[in-house]
């Protein structure tokens, strides 16, 4: 299989390196408008072929799949062109800036029978996959809230705000762990330095009374990467700043029990606290696992774990949150939709 | 000076102990409806006098000041009665459940020329006073956001939700550090177990574009007590779970500078990171410092550091936030008001 | 039962308070030469009787048992007098300064049929008892080393060095967890400020190739309280500075396996790393548990968990270590001894 | 300048990569007996030339300097051959297994007028260089002890024990920070699994009463990398496991003062505790800084920061410690020596 990679910036060399480790990948063609980037990539990967013009790459019949690692505003245009050229497509998160564009891509992918995968990298980390296992085997009981904080002194981006930059990670983790429809969103932000928010809070209502809250901050003196997932039986903490104990499962819970002791307070909250454990987490590089998932989806002609369905939901929520920020927290309801097709198959991933 | 203390529950013995250490305090009369509590207090403090009926205590002419440490719903009634009986009043936080009640107390305190102090205890800790010093000498530049998280596996209260329980602490710290008018509030909550919220997020707009966000959570597997205060020059972290290094001041900042390098991006965010330091913090028990402030305010006939003005603002914000939670985040504007009088003087504390 | 407590310094009020909570204890007589201490104790515990002279207390026939909480140099003299007066005895750690004195106490206790307990407080903490459980059920496999660090910016004592002050805690924990004879000791110290060591390292050889190392430091900028216990199956970490997760059990190990892969290296070390867990630890105050153990030993006429056998072993090791420090690490062999009697019974505690 | 690199194992690719970044380096020839390693290196660095036989490399006249990154037992033989072939030499730590070999290298280096540098990598980290600055400007007052702990679940080496593996790092840091002669050493170790110690404690006496202690452990469930340097004015903590705050300087100290308060205790220890700060540390890769130091030493014909003098002292101390371990802690005095020449110059580095 031959891969074209458009956009060789900060993340580019990691993508090239990981695709080179896959035995299925024979030729990689890299593409960037910036000549200095091309030179730098050539030094690191002497076997790579390089072009400066993405349309040249897209016209190349030998290329089976295209990776789009450019700024988000060009995602739609490039993905559309790639699909029309008959390529499978990998897109860096977030999928697009507008959900209408994302829906067009769904349509296009269906017609062209091509795979589209969104690089929600965290979904492919050992830690998140371990969390998925724990949730799936019912260890937490019924999960009822998700609270994430993602903060650091961050690289301001000129085209997107902190929410579009950081919250996709947490939304994709939420999606994987909790299979519930998002219903409505309310958000607030602060743009102190220019017109781009560097601090944003998003509150999300989901089905069945589940709620999620996301703090994203480019102006924090300390780096925080922390998710709490509360369940009726146990609670889970994911701290990505820990080297060895990224996940902790607490045998702590609350139950509402009837009691005869207090006539004024017949139902009482009872606490339970027990041991904590921290499961061993696999150390494989997430981007490598993701690259393999992309190749496997193509070979087996099945939807990838993070395909258009997942990508479009992230975009819809962020789009609604952005609208909410502009109206200072006004609740924005999310339209309901059902994908009939995902990737190249008509099976809904379960 | 003779002190009456109404309500001898969990917090009561601490109040009694701290008032006994003050040389100005001669006699303490304790009061609780619960006979077991009275017995327990008598064992710890054999010199104390006890009554079961608060009206008996309020009728006692020898009592100069009354401490109200009962559940919040009785605060207004007891404070009103105490003021009408000519006593100075100390009230545990939050001041009242309704801002209309709080305004009535302001009125009453003015007419009776008595001191009313709200026990916003954190304001009297060494850590918060050190933060105040650092902000006041301009070390942070212009502060522009306040982010607090207060979470633990908490004692559910039957009468108030997690926000009314925990957020007063952070609001009173915010008040002390940042002297800005609150303008509007938006909030969300979750009540999974009964009708009382155990998880709540409050976003507060203040004057001059300053924003504050408060996470309060009774259903967290880990205890978190953390405030970040961002400034244009430096940033400050307050982590109350640290034993020795509660406050850290980071010489980290962002500046917007014009640059000739990039014509497409003439104004660029520049980062600056330097040393961090953690100032030594005084270890005095906060409640003792607060008790002394109360006595001093009475003796010197001046408003206390946390008087009715501070108490009413906390109540107004929480009241608005509660209304916002009910309407799923709808922005609630705060009416503007000016106190003409505070405590017994007509001077606004500066 | 009536208790006399000699020495009401820093630790005294805690002892008084804990003995008062026991239903078996009727009368407590406190004793201290310092009149100010007596006044302070009277304020806190109005029901206490006080004397300034310890011999008056020892002559009092109504007193059944005596607590010795004075500086270590007076331990032997007071314990001897108490035993001769027919009292049971509780002694603060370390038991005595000289092992010859400790052996005399063993002799005397045997003849007088009285209980002598040494207050190795840590043995009575929930954390250490939990560690004991884990070791006893064989979870660690065969334990093979013990490494403790106890450091802080400490209260220099005028009569004993840092080793005599801090290492008894860790030696008593080692004794409880690992039932092995100490064989020989080598130690080093530093006395920078006066003639008293404030920094000391002790290495202890025990039976079966087990080794233990103790770092004790009064001149550390940070407080460290950490023990590692290595076993062939699992390893355990005890960090007393943690609030909630004091004990962590790591499913990590090494095995020596024969391998055919590498002819030059037929036996290879293989690593195994799995989950970690942190067991829930009971929160009871250790001193209260210890006080109960003392009363129970008297009532049931059985040796206490930390009796003379345990106390004398700690003293012998410290005495040898002190000698080793003076000769810059020279190995000092420990004489072997067998107690025939312990406390009032002739049963060796198992 | 052309560089030959002998030994392309675990550390090899890092060496190759760092030497390639230096503009002075033109050609690199790699050498390893293992053909698989050669292939792997060729894939990463297609421009490299490779040979399997080190004598071929040493005969190559175009090579100016040789890096020896082989197991320690071959260090002396290869370094000797390289010096006799007229090459400058870089040797991985530890310099040699025997100090007699190290002294021969000193002799040989003097006669051949070539540079020999030992790769004490930590000396070139931003953190250690910052510590050096702080010590040099007298901020700590007079340093009086050094305590290091280096522990993890480690890669057992077949040829050297844990002490030879880990303690060179800390000894080289000690050397840089504290310019004092080592006088005598006492050490203990444990070899539970085979004949190689995996746990070792080294105590080192230096001039002027300075002491140092080193804990090295391959069988720890947790990774610890911590140095405390105590001074009369301030104390410094270096925790290499911290991402951002590797160094903390504590304004904590002790002073011995005469007091009239207590006639029995005329000289009292007084404590002082103030602020802590954590200086910003430069992030450059240490190996790159070291590579530059090597090239600079050659070009400027001056001794490198970590030359033979530093290397031989580390070897002498470890050799004595190994002897002490065998005799269970017996103090081993270090012979005194003075280098007349270091590297190619006869100047002692100051």
Image (cartoon, coloured by chain):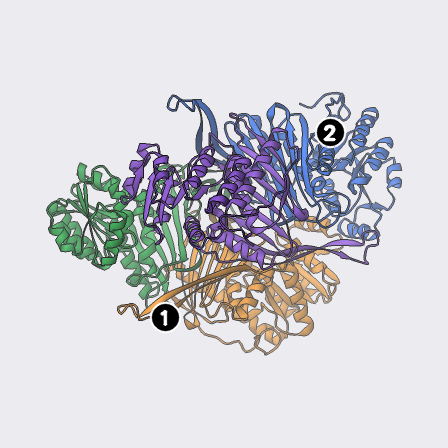
Chain colours: A blue, B purple, C green, D orange
Depth check, front residue: D337 or B68: B68
Number of the label disc, if any, that sits on residue A12: none
Q: Which residue is mark 2?
A: A297
Residue B112 vs residue A300: left or right? Answer: left
- Res C238 → quadrant: top left
Quadrant holding the C terminus of chain A:
top right
Regarding residue D107, the answer to whether it shows in the image is yes
Residue D297 vs residue A106: left or right? Answer: left
Q: Which residue is mark 1?
A: D257
Q: What's the residue at 75%, 51% (across, down)?
A: A44
Disc 1 crowd, CA 10 A, few/some/many (<14, 14-19, 20+): few
* Same-chain status of marks 2 and 1: no
Which element type, helix, strand or loop, lies under badge 1?
strand
Regarding residue D188, the answer to whether it shows in the image is no
Depth check, front residue: B124 or D175: B124
- Label 1 resides on the chain identified as D
Which element type, helix, strand or loop, lies under badge 2?
helix
Disc 2 crowd, CA 10 A, few/some/many (<14, 14-19, 20+): many
Q: Is residue B193 above or below residue B55?
A: above
């Amino acid at each position: 299989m031959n891969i074209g990679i458009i956009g060789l910036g900060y993340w580019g060399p990691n993508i090239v390196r990981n695709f080179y480790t896959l035995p299925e990948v024979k030729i990689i063609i890299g593409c960037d408008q910036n000549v200095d980037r091309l030179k730098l990539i050539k030094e690191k990967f002497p076997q790579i072929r390089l072009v400066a013009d993405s349309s040249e790459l897209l016209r190349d019949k030998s290329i089976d799949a295209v990776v789009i690692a450019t700024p988000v505003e060009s995602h739609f245009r490039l993905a559309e062109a790639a699909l029309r050229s008959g390529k499978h497509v990998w897109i860096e998160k977030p999928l697009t800036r507008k959900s209408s564009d994302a829906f067009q891509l769904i349509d296009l992918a269906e017609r062209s029978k091509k795979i589209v995968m969104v690089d929600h990298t965290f979904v492919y980390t050992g830690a998140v996959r371990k969390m998925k296992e724990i949730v799936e085997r019912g260890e937490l009981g019924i999960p009822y809230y998700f609270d994430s904080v993602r903060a650091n002194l961050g690289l301001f981006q000129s085209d997107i705000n902190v929410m579009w930059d950081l919250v996709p990670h947490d939304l994709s983790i939420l999606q994987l762990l909790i299979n519930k429809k998002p219903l409505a969103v309310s958000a607030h932000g602060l743009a102190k330095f220019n017109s781009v928010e560097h601090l944003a809070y998003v509150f999300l209502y989901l089905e069945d009374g589940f709620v999620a809250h996301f703090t994203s901050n480019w102006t924090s003196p300390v780096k925080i990467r922390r998710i709490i997932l509360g369940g009726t039986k146990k609670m889970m903490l994911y701290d990505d700043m820990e080297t060895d104990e990224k996940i902790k499962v607490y045998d702590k819970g609350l139950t509402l029990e009837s009691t005869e002791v207090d006539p004024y307070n017949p139902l009482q909250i009872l606490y339970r606290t027990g041991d904590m454990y921290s499961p061993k987490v696999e150390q494989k590089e997430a981007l490598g696992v993701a690259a393999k998932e992309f190749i496997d989806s193509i070979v087996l002609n099945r939807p990838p774990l993070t395909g258009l369905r997942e990508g479009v939901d992230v975009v819809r929520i962020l789009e609604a949150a952005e609208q909410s920020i502009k109206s200072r927290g006004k609740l924005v309801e999310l339209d309901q939709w059902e994908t009939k097709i995902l990737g190249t198959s008509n099976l809904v991933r379960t």
